[in-house]
Amino acid sequence: MDQRDPTRTAIMAELDSVAAEATDAVGVFMAWPRLLETSARVLRSFGEAGRAMLRDHPILAIARECPAANHSLARPRGYSGDARLIDYLQRHESVSEVLEAATPRGRAILNWTLSLSASEAVRECHALLASLIDQTAERVDDAHVLSATAGHLREASLALDAQSIGRWVAMDEDAETVDEMAESHADLPGLVAVHGGLARLLARPMTHGSFDLAYATGLTQQIDGETVHRLASAMFRSLRSGGRMLIACLTKDLPEAGYMDAYMGWCPPLLDGQDMRTLLDQVPDGPGIRKRVFYGANGRMVYGMIDRPA
């Protein structure tokens, strides 16, 4: 877009106003919602050109004072939405030193980010996983669990009965993520940390064994739509009798999606309820098979669940 374009000039003036106000914590919480609205509008109207415009302003440097945004834009593991970003959204102890080194304004932007509906939905999802793990451990002795997109497996720290899981296969496509997962949960007697493994699971669903609970919640830009559909089918085929599978994804109507794109470089796959139903339909209906689609508390995470009959 031409530097003299009146639309560009107006957008730059909006960004100037946000930057001028966001000089301290109170200013961030007052001004940053306007940045969220501007980002959504500009990206909706101008696409990639709009993203370039939003980043061609000094406010990008202010946004990068936020440790989560800076990490996500830097993509140290080669892709956005990695397990470390999720650690920031949970304020996990593994990022405490980085948070302490951040500017006060950067920490304020992070705190504002943690209040967004996507961040709340991510934290709620981990709480739900912990509950499902505990429920599975109570239901089945020596239960076997599969986490197909495990990240750092932080839900294991929330589950009260994690130590009771007989075998916990946790897969991730990123080697550094798998190393940290294995180190963080070295006390889990049943943990089998697997680098890669997704291709083998898709080709031969029983290659890692059979499971009482299988879930995939860390969907990233690394996993395309066709792979997600195949993953749903493979996970179900790996279930034992009475087993359960869960897939979770942020929703398409995410109001902060524009901000996440422009100032975090984070564009996770987004689904709606119908998309999730289509995903679950990769598993043919049959006697006793129960399929459910539901939303989290704030409506920003959609879940698909299938129960295999006992």
Image (cartoon, rainbow, N blue to C red):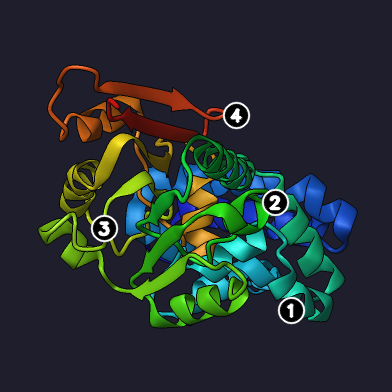
Q: Is residue 152 above or below residue 224?
A: below
Work out which residue is located at the far top of the displayed protein and give it: 287
Q: Earlier in the sequence, mark 1 or mark 3?
A: 1
Label 1 crowd bin: few (<14), some (14–19), many (20+), radius 10 Å: few
- Camera sees residue 237: yes
Q: Residue at x 88, y 62 (%)?
A: 24
Q: Is residue 75 left or right of residue 208?
A: right
Residue at image mark 2: 114
Mark identifier at residue 273: none
Q: Position of residue 131 (x, y in %)?
A: 59, 39
Distance Cα–Cα, label 4 vs label 1: 29 Å
Secondary structure found at label 4 = loop
Distance Cα–Cα, label 2 vs label 1: 16 Å
Quadrant location of the N terminus? bottom left
Q: Earlier in the sequence, mark 2 or mark 4?
A: 2
Mark identifier at residue 298: 4
Residue at image mark 3: 209
Q: Is residue 229 above or below residue 75?
A: above
Distance Cα–Cα, label 3 vs label 2: 37 Å
Q: Earlier in the sequence, mark 4 or mark 3?
A: 3
Q: Residue at x 33, y 72 (%)?
A: 173
